[in-house]
Image: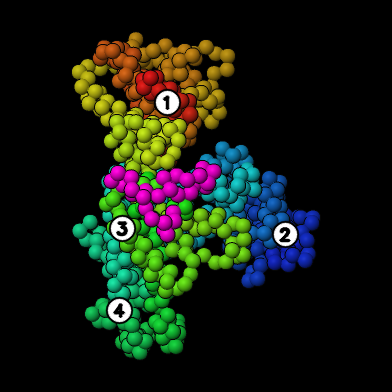
Amino acid sequence: MTKEVQSIYETIDDPIYIDAYDESVPIKDVYPERTTIAYKNHNFHIYAACYHERAKYITSAGSVVKSSLSPARCKIVEEYIRRCRKVSKGYIVHILSIFDWLEEHERMNFIYSHKDAFETYYRFTEYLYREARGSAIKGKSRTRGSLKKIQYGMQFFLSISSGLKMETLKNSALKIDQKGAYSDPQTRRASENDVKIFWKLNLRHFEAIASFLLNNQERPLIVPRQDIGFQDYKQWTFRLDSLSLEDSRSSGRDSGQDQFFDENDNFIFDAEAVKKRVKELGHRRYLGVNHRKYCAQLISEDEFFTLHLFRKAGIHFSHLLLMASGCNIEQLEGVDFSLPLSKSSDAKRQAVTKARAGYSKKPMRFSAKFLPLWRKYLKIRKLTVDKYDQDFGNLGIPLVSEKSYQTNRSFQLSQANANLLRISNTNQVGFPPNAETPLSKSGRDFKTINFLDLTNGDISKVSKIMGRSPEVTRKNYNYKSFEDSARELTSFFDALTKAVSIKAKTYSASVPIHTSGARIHTGSCEANEEAPAQIQGVTEFAPQPRCSAPLTCFFCVHFGHHADIQDIKLILSAKAWLRKQTKEVSRNIDEHVEKFLPIMERIDDIIDDFRNTSEEHGLVYDKALSEVEAGNYSKYWRNKIDAFMNALEA
């Protein structure tokens, strides 16, 4: 740093130090613009976040331009200081990089309202995902572990600025995980093929673990998967499996794992042989552990490895049970493995307790074909419980005393079960990184849809089978009927032999992207007192805009939309409703051409223009489209679709 540049930065006079651990000294009056938080290993100059301009060189840490003090920043920093003893250091220290990102992306004014906070958190997560996808390139990006902590930091930051709960923000976007490859930050509903592959993977892993435990096989655990399109999986110890070994070898990192294998790639279980192998490979250290510690680990490994596999078997079995029965995670907690199953025609069933339904009994049914897997899990469970004399939860989670769990025992177990079945944890059970891992509710969805097909859409009968009210089934699975109609419409539209265009020579597909304007059912309107007026460049086939007819707003000069998911969902939802109307209401192809095709053509032009403007707009479109395709329409259009379908049913 040159002297000229260095001269504009100054250190703070009369700094205030607050010990992050000493609660005997209360934090009363706070002066954020000159406060430093003292941690065990270093002092964090949090006051630097109060200034727009600060030195970003390590040698000049804490130097700022005093004239750039920001009152708005000071308010946020003050709250950080007051909470520094209540939260971990990781939530605090990323405030500087968060402010930098907000300034760079001009988001400083979009951190206070709930809506703006959600949008900012989503965009920040996109930014982190772009870094995460490049984190395997040495020296090119921060590690995923660091990015994960920064994401936590942004949750904490926005919870202070907007008042939202951290958990609410956390659930509004995808979570940065330390393991696994990253694709584009978007979610989509699982396809039927995704669920089938997920079933095969869980079944293959469960069968392999069951055979290993029941037959007392020697390590490694081997799961054959080549016939279903993935490499075979092997596991030697709790921490060492074929995935971690392949990852370290392909990246060129020396993780020290090779010293556990001989020249034929067989795992070495003898400590002396490992010590000899270390010398052959020329390692300077012996995995950081001594000979005695390794011997003790090998002795205890069998017992610990058995418990580890039992838990993995519980995870796989639970996924299989979710898909076979259509129950949800909450119902898994109510399964009593000590009770016999009762017959129900060709199916087996058990009444399970569901807390969210007032702790009432709900049926859980599965086909008789699933019975061998049920019995096999009972054998594994009995073997483990008898051997270790412990009380285990349904997924193999050892339960501690009632006193330890106190009144929250059932709740904590529920949270532990849910966490084990989360998408981000599937890599911990050995699934290939390129395998699709659907949400746990995907199995329930496809089971319900299957029953709806078999019963020709009998909602009452399906609700009774699935143990839910008809209203819930109708609300959550109406999109099934809509999807059937959409598939039929494909051939309907392909059969059009003529098309009437709305476009004249001066036609433009672009519409303004608003930063203000009133929200309407199709986007945004910037008219105050002005009457609606038709856009230039359209033919006589384009409808005249009327405020009472939302679909005609697409042809109004005052119409536009915000560059966010909410408005794009409005437009796509309107199109979805329009397609339904087209098939059911159009009495002939001429009426379709005259009444519906011009509006659909205009919508397609608006959407194509928006999504192709920039990569950021493309991500917004993809996110909105995935939600609409999953049946998550905007509220106004969802109500119209539901009302229309109910009228057809009546």
Q: Which residue is mark 4?
A: 267
> Tag 1, which secondary structure?
helix
Residue at horizontal 22 percent and vertical 16 percent from the top: 498
Asked which quadrant contains residue 451, the reply is top left
The numbered dot on residue 194 is: none
Question: Which sits earlier in the primary sequence, circle 4 or circle 2?
Answer: 2
User: Residue, x 57% and y 58% (percent of image)?
Assistant: 409
Q: Where residue 146 sits: x, y (%)? A: 50, 61
- Disc 1 target residue: 642
Q: Give the image quarter of residue 612.
A: top left
Q: Is residue 495 left or right of residue 198?
A: left
Type of the residue with mark 1:
Asp
Tell me: residue 534, above or below residue 317.
above
Compared with 588, 167 (above or below) is below
Which of the numbered marks, if any, corresponds to residue 35? 2
Q: Earlier in the sequence, mark 3 or mark 1?
A: 3
Q: Which residues are magenta?
A: 335-363
Q: CA distance from mark 3 to mark 4?
A: 31 Å
Label 1 crowd bin: few (<14), some (14–19), many (20+), radius 10 Å: some
Name the residue type under label 2: Thr
Q: Is residue 154 visible?
A: yes
Q: Nearer the viewer, mark 4 or mark 2?
A: 4
